[in-house]
Image (cartoon, helix red, strand yellow):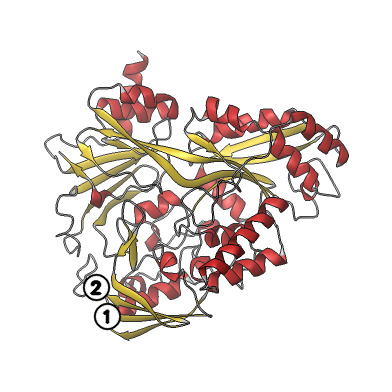
């Protein structure tokens, strides 16, 4: 009866495409893209969907190596200027030509106050169209890693944006609705056919796609369905109602591997999972401690760190699809070293002693905000942490909710304690520092995801300097010094680096991307 009911639920949730349509690929994951506006939310699944509609100047291949996108070549022509030569004869999916003017418009839009990508290009002073196929990007001093940041700035049609009154990015945290939230106009391999957020998204081939000759066999149609319930996602895959599941429940991976007609791809992801603590406010908003902030005392933060048995989480919650972390950045990111990535020892007795020394021998209460549909077993991780912190007297009120509510809550600085995961699309430590550690300063376009209220002037200066330093040895020293400060100050409690598993029909061929963002132009389906 349970199987029949599950199948009925799945059938109700999915639009079953005829098996005769061999070029339709149906896929699912636990949570939908938050918006189709390409600069509104710097969130992995959102960017992953948008890269099917939009292109960047520079792309990344399945090995995350930089390859030409809308720019064929790029080079520094002065200490503060990069030149990009654009791909000729490219059209947006409505048939209008792509030119340098669209690049200038898109970069200026990405620098707007409501953009969640301002920190990517905070060093940019000016973007200039030299001719229809040449762009100069001028920065405030040298920026040797600017090309790495351009891989995340997707290019929109200026004419389309002006026509539909979306010249500014959607203000997501204020729940603004604009035309760009459900529609797109890019040069990518797909176009939006149907967009029903949290229900169904249908993407069809862009007939004007410039890369059609290089990718002649990718599916004609993608049908995406978010399926929050783990059992329902697995049932949909096993029954053949979807062809690809991005995030099969870890407890079901062995079963999927043993099922005829299914297969998996696995890799270490460039993403770290950690806990953020509001250590800078005078008083925590969601705690029974009044008049002071227990998280401001490093002894409390260290006690919490040492009370978390990460190996138990790895084995019992993550089914070993995780690597314990001492840093909030993973292997594969420039500046990561195994020596820095060692965790402090799990030691409840030492943690209790630190709590007593800090003046909290009986602990305190605090709310923990946690998504339940974003990262692998995210709510279960938070449940495990809740139990572990109880051992040192910290009574955690776990508030688990959908990412559509979780991210706006923390972006409004309405959280004392939260779970977050951080990928690094630039593959460089500067990205981690400028978003998570630099003092939150909207005017400077830095610290955009630093909701801990952490501030360290020396680390701020190192982060600014490493963006401009062209001597690699000097730059690496700056990165190492910044990580030493970050580890010592401990505004975040690192948990683990994710390992990811993609599950699919054996009719599907697609290389796994370590950023956990499937790019279906690289896929085929029989």
- Quadrant location, the C terminus: top left
Q: Position of residue 461 (x, y in %)?
A: 66, 70
Q: Earlier in the sequence, mark 1 or mark 2?
A: 2
Between 9 and 245, the residue placed more toward the observer is 245
Horizontally, residue 168 falls left or right of residue 225, namely right
In the image, taking residue 400 as reference, residue 503 lies left or right, namely: left
Determine whether, in the image, residue 478 is placed left or right of residue 86: right
Is residue 61 placed above or below 210 in the rendered structure?
A: above
Q: Is residue 185 visible?
A: no
Residue 369 quadrant: top right
Is the Cβ of the residue at disc 1 closer than 8 Å to that at disc 2?
Answer: yes
Residue 181, compared with residue 159, is above or below; it is: above
Q: Tell me the distance, in whole angstroms, between the alpha carbons under discs 1 and 2.
A: 7 Å
Disc number at residue 133? Answer: 1
Place residue 154 in its image quadrant: bottom left
- The image shows residue 122 at horizontal and vertical percentages of 53, 72
Q: Position of residue 383 (x, y in %)?
A: 61, 30
Please tell me which residue is depicted at 63% across the width and 44% down the height of the picture: 418
Farthest residue in the top direction?
Answer: 1
In this image, 182 relative to 360: left or right? left
How packed is label 1: few (under 14 Cα within 10 Å), some, or many (20 or more)? some
Q: Residue furthest bottom?
A: 130
Q: Secondary structure at mark 1?
A: loop
Q: Which mark is residue 78?
A: none
Q: SS class of the residue under badge 2?
A: loop
Q: Look at the image and tell me whether residue 13 can be seen.
A: yes
- Between 21 and 516, the residue placed more toward the observer is 516
Residue identified by numbered label 2: 87
């Amino acid at each position: 009866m349970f199987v029949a009911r599950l199948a009925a639920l799945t059938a109700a949730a999915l639009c079953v495409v005829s098996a005769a349509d061999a070029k339709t690929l149906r896929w699912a994951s636990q949570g939908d893209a938050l918006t189709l506006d390409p600069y509104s939310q710097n969130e992995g699944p959102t960017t992953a969907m948008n890269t099917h509609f939009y292109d960047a100047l520079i792309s990344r291949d399945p090995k995350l190596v930089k390859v030409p996108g809308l720019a064929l070549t790029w080079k520094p022509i002065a200490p503060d200027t990069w030149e990009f030569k654009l791909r000729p004869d490219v059209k947006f999916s409505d048939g209008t030509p792509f030119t340098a003017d669209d690049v200038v418009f898109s970069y200026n839009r990405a620098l707007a106050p409501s953009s969640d990508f301002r920190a990517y290009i905070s060093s940019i002073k000016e973007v200039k169209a030299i001719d229809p196929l040449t762009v100069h990007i001028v920065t405030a001093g040298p920026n040797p890693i600017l090309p790495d940041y351009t891989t995340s700035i997707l290019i929109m049609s200026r004419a389309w944006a002006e026509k539909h009154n979306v010249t500014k990015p959607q203000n997501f945290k204020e729940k603004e609705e604009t035309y760009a939230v459900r529609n797109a106009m890019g040069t990518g391999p797909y176009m939006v056919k149907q967009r029903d957020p949290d229900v169904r998204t249908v993407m069809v081939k862009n007939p004007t796609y410039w890369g059609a000759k290089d990718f002649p066999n990718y599916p004609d149609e993608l049908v995406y369905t978010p399926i929050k319930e783990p059992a329902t996602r697995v049932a949909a895959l096993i029954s053949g109602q979807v062809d690809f599941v991005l995030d099969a429940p870890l407890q079901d991976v062995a079963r999927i591997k043993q099922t005829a007609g299914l297969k998996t791809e696995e890799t270490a992801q460039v993403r770290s999972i950690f806990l953020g603590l509001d250590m800078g406010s005078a008083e925590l908003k969601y705690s029974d401690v009044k008049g002071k902030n227990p998280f401001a005392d490093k002894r409390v933060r260290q006690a919490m760190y040492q009370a978390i048995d990460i190996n138990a989480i790895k084995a019992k919650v993550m089914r070993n699809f995780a690597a314990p972390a001492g840093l909030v950045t993973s292997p594969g990111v420039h500046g990561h070293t195994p020596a820095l990535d060692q965790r402090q020892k799990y030691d409840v007795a030492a943690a209790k002693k630190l709590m007593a020394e800090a003046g909290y021998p009986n602990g305190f209460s605090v709310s923990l905000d946690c998504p339940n549909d974003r990262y692998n077993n995210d709510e279960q991780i938070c449940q495990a942490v809740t139990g572990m912190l109880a051992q040192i007297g910290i009574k955690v009120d776990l508030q688990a909710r959908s990412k559509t509510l979780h991210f706006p809550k923390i972006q409004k600085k309405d959280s004392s304690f939260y779970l977050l995961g951080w990928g690094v699309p630039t593959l460089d430590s500067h990205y981690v520092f400028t978003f998570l550690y630099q003092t939150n300063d909207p005017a400077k376009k830095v610290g955009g995801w630093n909701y801990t209220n952490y501030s360290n002037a020396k680390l701020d200066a190192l982060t600014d300097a490493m963006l401009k330093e062209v001597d690699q040895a000097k730059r690496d020293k700056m990165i190492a010094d910044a990580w030493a400060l970050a580890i010592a100050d401990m505004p975040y409690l690192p948990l683990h680096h994710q390992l990811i598993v993609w599950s699919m029909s054996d009719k599907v061929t697609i290389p796994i991307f370590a950023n956990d963002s499937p790019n279906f132009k690289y896929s085929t389906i029989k």
